[in-house]
Amino acid sequence: MSIRPFEQHTPHIHPTAYVDTAALVIGDVEIGQDSSIWPMSVVRGDIQSIRIGARTSIQDGTIIHVTHDSRFCPGGQPTLIGNDVTVGHKVILHACTIEDFCLIGMGAIVMDKAVVRSRVTIGAGSVVPPGKVLESGFLYVGSPVKQIRPLTERELEFLEYSAQNYQRLKDRHRAMAGSADAASNPAPIKPEVPPATPKPRTRRSATPKHR
């Protein structure tokens, strides 16, 4: 994996989290318990902070970035991602807030200062414009996104299942990574010590002693 500091900031990654060897995490980033960052994802907290909660999966090819401090955005804008969030493949999250138990569909884009409330599903390829707030409990689809309908009970259950499924999957990948490390760094083999060669006995002389 590539985990790099930027200036005075170093990423903080929970010991139970998984960051794939092909992912990149930079700067002021915190990744919570049992979360996962999958191949080719970039989490770049160089000009503001990124916070990722527990049991959240950031899937392959996703880009997470922030906005810098300027007269157009005083103080800058971080990216905040809650617990139990599933972020699909090739998503862009830029200086936005995603609350708990959300599913961000593949290829979706969430722009600056947008807020996605808890238990929301965003359809694949959708775009959430800057500053838009998505109400909890609904499906949103489109570019720009529109509220389509309330999530069904089954869809709400799936949000929890998805987070749990990726938690189990990252455990399997962590186990494989540990096995690979052990295989590439085997314990040194102690050289065998040959058995000691017995010393030859010195035979006593058969000449009788004088009396």
Image (cartoon, rainbow, N blue to C red):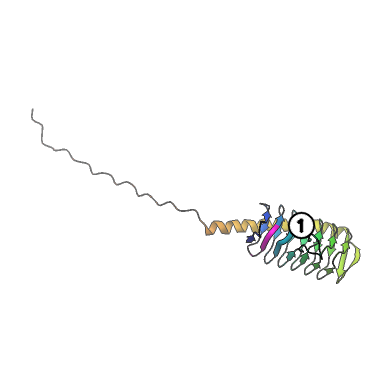
Location of residue 15 in the rendering, given as x and y in whole percent from the top left corner: 66, 51
Of residues 71 and 164, which is closer to you in this image?
Answer: 71
Location of residue 35 in the rendering, given as x and y in whole percent from the top left corner: 72, 56
Q: Quadrant of the C terminus?
A: top left
Q: Residue at x 16, y 38 (%)?
A: 204
In the image, is residue 208 part of the stretch drawn in magenta?
no
Q: Residue at x 34, y 47 (%)?
A: 195
Q: Is residue 156 visible?
A: yes
Query: For the magenta stretch, what is the residue range?
Result: 21-28
Q: Main secondary structure of the magenta part?
A: strand
The image quarter containing residue 2 is bottom right
The image quarter containing residue 55 is bottom right
The image quarter containing residue 152 is bottom right
Of residues 116 and 125, which is closer to you in this image?
Answer: 116
Under circle 1, the secondary element is helix
Q: Amino acid at mark 1?
A: Ala
Q: Quadrant of the N terminus?
A: bottom right
Of residues 66 and 181, which is closer to you in this image?
Answer: 66
Q: Residue at x 67, y 61 (%)?
A: 26
Location of residue 164 in the rendering, given as x and y in whole percent from the top left corner: 75, 55
Of residues 19 and 12, which is closer to you in this image?
Answer: 12
On the rendered structure, is 182 left or right of 35? left
On the rendered structure, is 176 left or right of 99? left
Residue found at the very far left of the displayed protein: 210
Q: Is residue 199 above or below residue 24?
A: above
Q: Is residue 151 visible?
A: no
Location of residue 112 in the rendering, given as x and y in whole percent from the top left corner: 81, 65
On the rendered structure, is 64 left or right of 131? left
Residue found at the very far front of the displayed protein: 71
Q: Residue at x 53, y 59 (%)?
A: 184
Q: 10 Å neighbourhood of mark 1: few (<14), some, or many (≥20)?
A: many
Q: Which residue is mark 1?
A: 163
